[in-house]
């Protein structure tokens, strides 16, 4: 019998175990059907920023920054965080919500400031900037490494007595009346637990549906493309380009392109264990077109590689961090493609909700992430929605 069983060893499961450990919970078992970071975590583009219109999400991102900055001291491992800064650019159609959102973020303490075209030209000298209206700059943003972060948590957890079982697939959550009592593994083994936490990303509904719990998650394919610019572009910050609707980051001299285009985030994955591992021809063409438009100074761009991953998307593109109708059954899923940057604070939020029923994280309203909001029709959306960009901003 473990006090706590966590299903899933991505950044969310491992950061939650870390946060519980900090609170004195030591009897923790993590069950992972594959290997640590084998899910969305190992595919993550790893962008770290606080630019969100939803107060609780911006506040979770802000609360996570300190962890990324000090991870080496905290975990004793290099988790690959590169604080290159984070830049957002919008066109005139988004000036109003963008300005309001940035001012709101500033009121929460997010280190973000408006900057002009000349300043951006220094950060990204090869970029075409004339079709942007306004920019903001987060000097404490950047990118991290999902795989290294989850492995860093896992190594720390093992050193501190947490059991991590890989190749341990949970096939059923066990209940007695309205209480969760443990889980059953694929080989029939029963693992009893006081508390069961489902941090299995897009696989969670397979475990909750038999219990009559509707967890509305659409598994959406996300395609990423790595391009060799054929020239030395120097160091550049992560750039969310809301005119061309793309995220661009410099990875060791190569450019990583991802989408922030609402109209493209539409391909549901029918089999979570068997979906295309590379970007489609259509995606490559779109990236090429956008890259040439945005970076006309790049002379010989070449596609180096592509990869894909799955977003566990909810109807409002926001997290589910929530208890259920079953005592002792807690959900952490629906990260909707933006769970890496907030993972340290999500772990803390979950630990506080389980142990105390509320959170101490400044400006986070824990009930914002409750599962019941979907049935209530009370979706968690930004008061400053951007035209064309996906709902996560
Ligand atoms: C291509 C891509 C780009 C991204 N870019 C960014 C970004 O720039 N910034 C950002 O903040 N976020 C980004 N994200 C999102 C972020 O990476 C994810 O939200 C985060 O990693 C999710 O972590 P997780 O632990 O919830 O899920 P996962 O990493 O999917 O982990 C869930 C784990 O649970 C295991 N599991 C599932 N079911 C079971 C079961 N029944 N029994 C045992 N184990 C089980 C799985 O094997 C898996 O390892 C991106 C995601 C993708 C795919």
Image: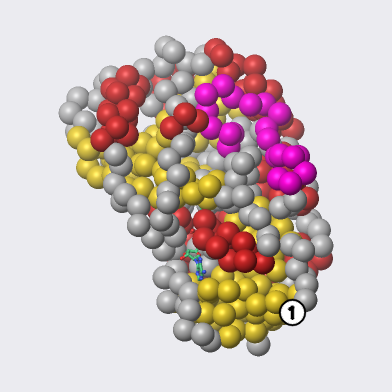
Residue 77, image x, y percentages:
46, 66
Q: Which of 351 and 75 is in front in this view?
A: 351
Residue under label 1, please give it.
176
Quadrant for residue 80, please give it: bottom left
- Residue at screen point 32% across, 28% down: 286
Taking the magenta stretch, the answer to whether it contains residue 341 is no
Apparent side of residue 218 relative to residue 105 in the rendered image (left or right): left
Figure check: 145 above or below 195: above
Whether the magenta-drawn stretch holds residue 388 is answered as: yes
Pick the quarter of the image with the C terminus: top right
Question: Measuring 30% from the left and 42% from the top, which residue is drawn there?
Answer: 279
- Look at 42% across and 49% down and name the residue there: 269
- Which of the 4 image quarters holds residue 272? bottom left
Asked whether 127 or 28 is in front, the reply is: 28
Q: How many marks overall?
A: 1
Q: Residue 107 appears at what percent x and percent y?
A: 74, 33
Q: Is mark 1 on a helix, strand or loop?
A: strand
Residue 107's place in the image compared with 44, above or below, is above
Number of other residues with Cα within 10 Å of mark 1, as a class: few under 14, some 14 to 19, many 20 or more: few
Frontmost residue, 60 versus 68: 60
| Residue at 63% in and 40% down | 316
Q: Judge from the rendering whether residue 20 lies leftward or rightward of residue 154; answer left or right.
A: right
- Residue 362 visible in the shown view: no
* Residue 103, visible in the rendered structure: yes
**In the displayed structure, would residue 258 be above or below residue 295?**
below
The x, y position of residue 106, in whole percent, is 69, 32
Q: Main secondary structure of the magenta part?
A: loop
**Quadrant in the picture for the N terminus:** bottom right
Magenta highlight range:
374-393
Image coordinates of residue 365 in percent, x first then y, are 78, 47
């Amino acid at each position: 019998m473990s006090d706590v069983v966590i299903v899933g060893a991505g950044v969310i499961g491992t950061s939650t175990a870390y946060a519980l450990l900090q609170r004195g919970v030591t009897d923790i078992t993590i069950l992972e059907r594959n290997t640590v970071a084998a899910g969305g975590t190992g595919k993550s583009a790893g962008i770290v920023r606080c630019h969100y219109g939803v107060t609780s999400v911006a506040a979770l991102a802000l609360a996570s920054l300190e962890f990324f900055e000090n991870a080496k001291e905290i975990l004793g491992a290099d988790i690959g965080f590169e604080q290159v800064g984070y830049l957002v650019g919008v066109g005139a159609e988004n000036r109003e919500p963008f300005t309001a959102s940035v001012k709101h973020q500033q009121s929460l303490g997010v280190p973000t400031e408006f900057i002009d075209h000349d300043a951006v030209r220094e950060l990204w000298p090869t970029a075409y900037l004339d079709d942007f209206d306004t920019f903001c700059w987060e000097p404490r943003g950047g990118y991290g490494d999902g795989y290294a972060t989850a492995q860093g948590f896992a190594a720390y957890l093992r050193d501190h007595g947490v059991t991590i079982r890989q190749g341990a697939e949970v096939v059923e959550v066990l209940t007695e009346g309205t209480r969760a009592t443990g889980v059953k593994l694929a080989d029939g083994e029963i693992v009893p637990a006081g508390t069961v936490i489902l941090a299995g990303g897009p696989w969670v509904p397979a475990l909750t549906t038999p219990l009559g719990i509707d967890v509305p998650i659409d598994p959406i394919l996300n395609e990423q493309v790595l391009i060799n610019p054929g020239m030395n572009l120097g160091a550049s910050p992560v750039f969310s380009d809301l005119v061309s609707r793309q995220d661009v980051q410099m990875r060791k001299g190569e450019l990583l392109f991802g989408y922030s285009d609402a109209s493209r985030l539409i391909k549901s994955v029918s089999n979570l264990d068997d979906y295309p591992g590379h970007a489609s021809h259509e995606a490559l063409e779109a990236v090429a077109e956008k890259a040439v438009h945005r970076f006309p100074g790049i002379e010989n761009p070449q596609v180096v590689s592509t990869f894909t991953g799955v977003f566990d998307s909810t109807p409002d593109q926001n997290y589910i961090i929530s208890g259920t109708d079953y005592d002792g059954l807690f959900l952490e899923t629906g990260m909707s493609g933006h769970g890496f940057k907030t993972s340290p604070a999500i772990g803390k939020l979950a630990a506080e909700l389980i142990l105390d029923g509320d959170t101490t994280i400044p400006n986070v309203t824990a009930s914002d992430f409750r599962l019941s909001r979907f049935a209530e029709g009370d979706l968690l959306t930004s008061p400053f929605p951007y035209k064309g960009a996906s709902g996560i901003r």
